[in-house]
Amino acid sequence: MSQVWFQHTFSRKRFRTRNQATAIAILGVAILLILGSLYLSQVASFAITNREIEDLIRRRDEIKRENERLIGEIASFRTVPRLYARAVELGFRPAVNADIDYVLIAGYNPDREQLLRAPTSTEALNPAAPAYVETFGGWLEEQFDLLRRQFQSFAG
C-alpha cells in the first residue's frame, strides 16, 4: 500500500500539469516585471527630460529679464543730461561765437530753395550703355593671333 501511495503522489501526469501551470505563472510574472520596469524607466526618463526643460525655460526667462534690465540701463546712459555731464567730464564745453570758424565758399548760396536738382532728361536718368562690338569670330581671331605670336617668339 505504501507503494501505491508513493506512485500516486509522484505520478508523472500530475507532476507535468503542475509544472506547466507553474512555468506559465512564472513566465507571466517575469513578463509583467519586464514590462513594468520598461514603463518605469520611460516614465523616469520623461520626468528627467521635463525637469531639464523647466530648468532651461527658467534660465531663458532669467536671461531675458537681465537683457531687458541692461537695455534699460543703456537707455539711461543715453539721456541728454547724462551725455552732457559725460562730455563735461571729458573736457568739452559749449561752443561760443569766438570758438566758431566760418568757411566761405565761392559760389555757394545758402538761401537757395533746392540744394540738389533732379535730372530732367531721360538721358541723364538712363545713361547709354557702352557699345559692345566684339563678336565670337573677332575673339577667336584674337586668340589665334596670340598663339601665333607665342610660336614666333619661340622660333625667333
Image (cartoon, rainbow, N blue to C red):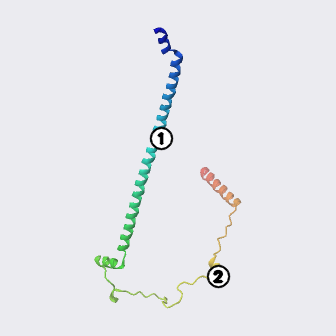
Q: Quadrant of residue 143?
A: bottom right
Where residue 85 appears, as percent x and y from the top left, is: 30, 78
User: Farthest front residue?
Assistant: 1
Question: Would you say 156 lies left or right of 112 here?
Answer: right
Q: Residue at x 63, y 53 (%)?
A: 152
Q: Amino acid at mark 1?
A: Tyr
Residue in the foreground of this view, choosing between 71 and 64: 64
Q: Secondary structure at mark 1?
A: helix
C-alpha span from label 2 to label 1: 82 Å
Write down the residue under mark 1. 39
Image coords of residue 68 (percent x, y) = 39, 67
**Looking at the rendered structure, which numbered label has been put on residue 121?**
2
User: Which residue is more in the foreground, 76 or 88?
Assistant: 76
Q: Position of residue 88 (x, y in %)?
A: 29, 79
SS at circle 2: loop
Residues packed near mark 2 inside 10 Å, few (<14), some (14 to 19) or many (20 plus): few
* Residue ranking furthest to the bottom: 111
Above or below, comparing residue 72 to residue 30 in the picture: below
Residue type highlighted by circle 2: Ser
Image height check: is 63 above or below 32?
below
